[in-house]
Image (tube, rainbow, N blue to C red):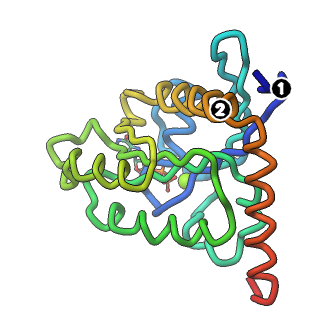
Amino acid sequence: MEVKKNSAFKTIFFGPMKTGKTSIFYNYFYKEFKDIPDFLGFKTIKIPVGEFEISLNVFDFQGNEKYANIAPIYYMKTSVLILVFDITHYSSYERIPICFQKVKEHIDPLVTVLIGNKLDLENERVIEKEKAIDYAKEMGFLYFETSAKTGENIKEVFVEIAKKLKFLIEKNPEILEEKEEKEKKKRKKSENKCF
Ligand SMILES: Nc1nc2c(ncn2[C@@H]2O[C@H](COP(=O)(O)OP(=O)(O)O)[C@@H](O)[C@H]2O)c(=O)[nH]1
Ligand SMILES: [Mg+2]
């Protein structure tokens, strides 16, 4: 088993604005729901998986979809991509494939997670769970529904990410190097572009 003790995996929240990315991140750390006017920046999450500890270096960028074209440097070397939509807003779900396509031009994440957030507003839901599950399956994403308000399922998201990373590295110890190579190729491809 090759998960080094100090393996830290870059993890980013990405996707449409106002879906609850910052709130999910905040809830994980502080176990409360607050209207946070700003973004949280960067924090490390440590998760034990069996006898190992997986560290996730998690980034939350303000208005990150808006900066999708100008900030590839922020999401370079991302191992875990967390895409969040709001189950009560159709347009946020519709934007997920567009957001994914944008970041995929620059990165090659090992794990991508799709989150349908605001589960406490179930009675206002406009995106059927089955529809989102089918899409996630088709894309090879993990899928969760969470509430940053009640805290439902938030811990589980990070635990499952850590388990999946451990599984992938056990299956292929070279996976991180291979990922870096793929990204290098992507960078070469976009070398002549301004962003
Ligand atoms: N009811 C409810 N509101 C939420 C939830 N998560 C976030 N919000 C609210 O949605 C708005 C946007 O949240 P924020 O975390 O800033 O979204 P971001 O732009 O994706 O980072 C804020 O007013 C939050 O209070 C949730 O799970 N349930
Ligand atoms: Mg935010």
The extreme left residue here reads 123
Residue sitting at 23 percent across and 52 percent down?
A: 131
* Relative height, residue 56 to residue 103 (above, below): above
Residue type for callout 1 = Lys
Q: Is residue 158 left or right of residue 74?
A: left
**What label does residue 38 carry, if any?**
none
Q: Position of residue 20 (x, y in %)?
A: 45, 48
Q: Is residue 114 left or right of residue 71?
A: left
| Residue that badge 2 annotates | 171
| Residue that badge 1 annotates | 4
Frontmost residue, 191 versus 67: 191
Residue type for callout 2 = Lys
Q: Secondary structure at mark 1?
A: loop
* Relative height, residue 71 to residue 136 (above, below): below
Q: Is residue 139 left or right of residue 194?
A: left
- Would you say the beta carbon of the disc 1 residue lies within 8 angstroms of ligand 2? no
Q: Is residue 24 left or right of residue 59?
A: left
